[in-house]
Amino acid sequence: MIDVAGWAPETRETTEVIGAAPAAALAGVLDIGPPGEELPPLWQWLYFLERPAQHELGADGHPREGRFLPPIPDRRRMFAGGRFRIAEPLRVGDTVTRRDELASTAVKNGRSGEMLFVTVRHTFLRDGTEIAVEEQDLVYRSGDPADRPAGRPEAPAGPPPEPPAVDAPWTLPMTADPVLLFRFSALTYNAHRIHYDEEYATGVEGHAGLVVHGPLLAILCLELPRRADVRVRELSFRARRPVFAGRPFTAAGAPDGTLSIEAPGGVTAMTATFA
């Protein structure tokens, strides 16, 4: 049974100068030009990175310990979604302080057993003034992944799936190959093996292939209003199903504030709203 009674990590603050290089690097991964002085929403994920020593990593590539990692055995982590409210954008050259705190925890029962939902809040400050607030929702399951059925899932029969047919004012068709996933993992210092180690992703975690990062999907959703020159002040997003490398998907959206990631077979992998 998951028990986090008494777990109350202290608030932490980190200060960093927002450099141009990480944003330019992500722009290259997305095959677009650098964004300029203002960081697009969610591109703050390229900054304030934790860089643990190699011996601090667990078998899945994630750190075994950390301020906001819950004290439960054999954690398995999933990115569930989040929210972002922007009063003023982060800008290249800014000195920004990020204040990190545990916002909430909740234990729920799902099809795979007990899950711990953890929300971490990041408040961004410039010259002591709050300019943005982000909340990340993470899900942890307790249990040894080796207990899951081993063996690579069988590949679907027939030709590769066609890109999903999407009827929306804004669309961005994509196929994330292993190189793209590797580069995004490098930019965000994410060593989770489901994004680059196919044998681990399929044989240990039980996925159908390399998993496309949830944060990457959220950034692609926000590319739609950005490319339409629509300024986003607030957004919320929820990951619903995994998307796998080599399989086409489409970011879809509309000026009314709805966004989604659509995968083959009528599967909606992520939903989002913005204002």
Image (cartoon, rainbow, N blue to C red):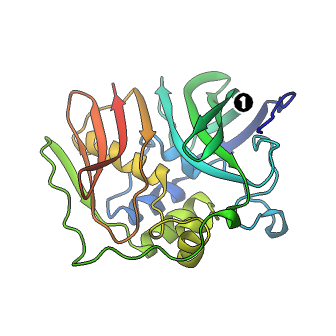
**Who's the residue at 20% across and 49% down the image?**
171
Q: Considering the image in quadrants, where does the C terminus appear?
A: top left
In the rendered view, would you say 31 is above or below 256? Answer: below
Query: Which quadrant of the figure has residue 104?
Result: top right
Is residue 194 visible in the rendered image? The answer is yes
Query: Which quadrant of the figure has residue 239?
Result: top left
Query: Residue 182: x, y in percent?
Result: 51, 71
In the rendered view, would you say 51 is above or below 12? Answer: below
Judged left or right of residue 208, residue 267 is left
Query: Residue 31: x, y in percent?
Result: 32, 64
Residue linked to disc 1: 102
Q: Considering the image in quadrants, where does the N terminus appear?
A: top right
Query: Residue 109: x, y in percent?
Result: 61, 35
Judged left or right of residue 179, residue 32 is left
**Who's the residue at 80% across and 56% down the image?**
64
Callout 1 amino acid: Leu
**Who's the residue at 35% across and 50% down the image?**
220
* Viewer-nearest residue: 196 or 18: 196
